[in-house]
Structure formats: structure tokens, C-alpha cells
Amino acid sequence: MELKPGYKMTEVGIVPEDWISFELGKCGSLQRQAIIPSSYPHQVFYEYSMPAFDDGKNPIKVYGKDILSNKTIIRGQLILFNKLNVRQKRVWLINNTNKNSICSTEFLPYKTKKIIISLLKQILLTDKVTLYFENRSTGTSNSQKRITPNTFLEFKCYLPLSLTEQQAIAAALSDVDELLSSLDRLIAKKKDIRLATMQELLTGKKRLPGFDEPWSEKLFGELFEFLPTNAYTRAQFTDEGTINNIHYGDILMMYENYIDVNKSTLPFINESLSNKLYTKKSFVMNGDIVIANTAEDYTVGKAVEVINVNRKILSGQHTFLCRPKIEFIKKFLGYIINAYYFQNQINTYITGIKVYSISKFNISKLKLKFPINLKEQQAIVSILSDMDAEIEALEARRDKVRNIKTGMMQELLTGKTRLISAGETA
């Protein structure tokens, strides 16, 4: 490969000739950690007073001096790199120059004066570096693979020697991070408003103008028919096929009130599985409700309405497929099933210790209160759908900014684009 003038080939790829290799163990050091007594809740960082986390989150608990006695006190700007759960990309930038702090043993507090620490954070969060540490981690469980201090300190990256240029790169990426954070905050606020509106409109506490008929209240078992589901695992899914499958994990993690089939990324069932297992009633229809009947926490009972069904879809492992016996307006069931009024009833019937579940029998006993007038249902859906559209537009904007940042990182962290000319120091 012919290199562009001013660039060189390294073990990490092509970089500018004036960029040098920084090995973390040679240009910085790990700070001492403390063993935190088991009587205290697990926390990330321990200190006398709160530091400012640059991502706006504070997984911190303030304790008295008894915990900090005879321990090394950390001061200054540093990175906390989680040596557990490698795939979660847990990296924090701590700015606590004037505060006394101490770190638990589950994290690697790193300090350096040769690399702009906010730039190092950006590097550690890239997919390529995450894969680097994942491949060098120890342990048998993917969720609890560990990074040793030596593995962390042996990591190398290529950067400009000039701290001024490093700072320019870090500032450019931090500006995009701030925009992403502001969009995340706005999306969270809009979702909170939507939840509050659902609570008002879907319990009948607030009636829309022109509607004053009493709402009907019936048992879930009176309103819905339970239909066959399957027990296929993710190992039996493919990216292509003719039959989609709704897995309970996707209900819990990917979707909110409904699955719009036109916009979904549902997995396919492996074609080698016998079609004899599928009956006509097994296939999902427009307006069906799919409930996740198992979860590792109290999200069990989370449900989605399936809309715009235009292909064969089955309801999968740990789900209930429920078909309404009477007519409801499109999307209305997805909203009302997930409203506090209904979900709070589910909580009283959840069983289990490490894995939680709810039975078909208990679901059938729950009460559903709803307007019989379809025009009132439509009026409620219209308001909530407008809110959904606003949230989706903000999420699309956030995704676009994330893609822009990915492109920026590819340019700036490889030196393809220079913010300061080679050799410039101010």
C-alpha cells in the first residue's frame, strides 16, 4: 500500500509521521484502590464530597472519614476504567482536583500528564479498543470478564506529542458529546411528560372535551384470548427468513408500547425448524398484545401491541400472545396495557426470586378500564402518537449526531484530519 506523504504504517494502522506511541504504563500510573467494607452498598467512587461526572451521572455515595482512614487519597483529574463487564464500555472521567477521593478495587483509576485525559476517555470508548480489551480479558462469563491492571497498562495508542493538538481533538469530540447529552436529557424529559399524560388520560382522571360517557371495566380474561406461543431461543434465530419471532428480551429492551412491523428489526426463525409446529392461530395479527411473562426484574409484564402486520410473525419464548375479543383503536391497547393502572396490578402477582414471572391465570384476573367510545380511544391515541412522533424525531436526530461523531473519531483519532498543523504547539 502506498502511503500518503506525511504518514506512516503502525501496528494500529496509518497515522501521521509526527504522532508517537503512548503506552499507558509508561506515560502514567494507576492510583491505589481501597477495599470497601461489605456493610456498605456497592458504589463506583468514594469520597468526602461529590465530584462532577462529565456524563451527568453520579453513581457515588458519600461516606464519613471512617471509610477513608488509612487509605490513599486521590486528587486531580483521572479516568476510572471498569475492569469488570468489559462489553459495557464503562469509562468515567473524574474532575475532582480540589476534592479528596478514594476508589474501590473494582475499578482502575488512571492518571497521566502526557495524554489529555478526556481524549484518552474517547479512545477507550471506541469499539476497536473495547474489542482489544475483550480479547485480552480473563474469566469464563462474558458478563463478568475481568481486565487485569497489567493488561490495561500495556495498552498503546498513537497520538500527537503536542498537548495542544490533543486538547483540540478532545474539545471537538467533547462538543459533540455535550450535544448528545443535551438530546438525551430532552428525550428523557419528553418521555416523562408522555408517561404523565398516559397516567392522566388512560385512567379516566382527565377526560378530553366532548367525552363524558362512563368507562367500562372488565377482567383481562374476558377481553382477550390466549393463543399458542413457542420456546425458540436466540440460537435458533437468523437474519433472514420468512417467519419473524417476537422474543421476550426484545419486548423488555427494544420496544415501548407497540411494535410497528414496518419499522421493526425482528429476528427470523431458522427455516430448518418444523413448520408443523405452527397453526393458523399461532401467527400474530394486527392489534394483538404480546406480554413478556418472565424477566430478571420487575419489568415482567411489559407488553407491546403489534401493528402494521404484513408478514408471518410468531410470539416466542416467555411470552403470552393475547388477541382482543372486541374492537379497539390501533395503538390504544399498547398504551393502556403499559399504563401504571394496569402494570401496578401485575406487580401484585409477580413470583420468583432471581427470575420473576407471572402466570396466565393471574393475568386473566387483572382489570382493564377503558372507554367504550372508539372516538374517545382515537382522541387519546392521537395525543400520545403526536408525543411519540416528537420523541422519534429527537431520537433520529440523536442517532444522526452519533453517526457524525463516529465519522469524526475515525478522522481525528487516526490523524486523517488535523486540527493543528504538524509541529504547531500553540
Image (cartoon, rainbow, N blue to C red):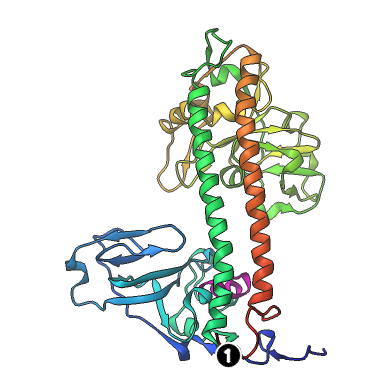
Q: Give the x, y percent position of residue 331.
A: 65, 28
Mark 1: amino acid: Ser
Say whether residue 64 is left or right of residue 347: left
Using the rendered image of the protein, determine whether residue 271 is visible from the camera's viewpoint. yes
Does residue 128 show up magenta in the picture?
yes
Q: Give the x, y percent position of residue 409.
A: 64, 71
| Nearest the eye: 327 or 281 | 327
Say whether residue 80 is left or right of residue 279: left
Give the prevailing secondary structure in the magenta stretch: helix
Q: Give the x, y percent position of residue 405.
A: 64, 65
Q: Which residue is mark 1?
A: 21
Q: Residue at x 47, y 87 (%)?
A: 114
Q: Quadrant of residue 312?
A: top right
Q: Quadrant of the N terminus?
A: bottom right
For this orientation, the residue located farthest to the top is: 213
Mark 1 residue crowding within 10 angstroms, few (<14) / some (14–19) / many (20+):
few
| Nearest the eye: 208 or 198 | 208
Q: Residue at x 51, y 70 (%)?
A: 140
Q: Is residue 329 above or below residue 213?
A: below
Secondary element at tag 1: strand
Q: Quadrant of the C terminus?
A: bottom right
| Nearest the eye: 152 or 173 | 173
For this orientation, the residue located farthest to the front is: 426
Q: Is residue 24 above or below residue 278?
A: below
Q: Give the x, y percent position of residue 184.
A: 54, 51
Say whether residue 32 is left or right of residue 321: left
Task: Please state the total of marks drawn on the protein image.
Answer: 1
What stretch of residues is rendered in magenta? 121-131
Q: Is residue 50 above or below residue 252?
A: below
Q: Quadrant of residue 297?
A: top left
Using the rendered image of the protein, determine whether residue 231 is visible from the camera's viewpoint. no
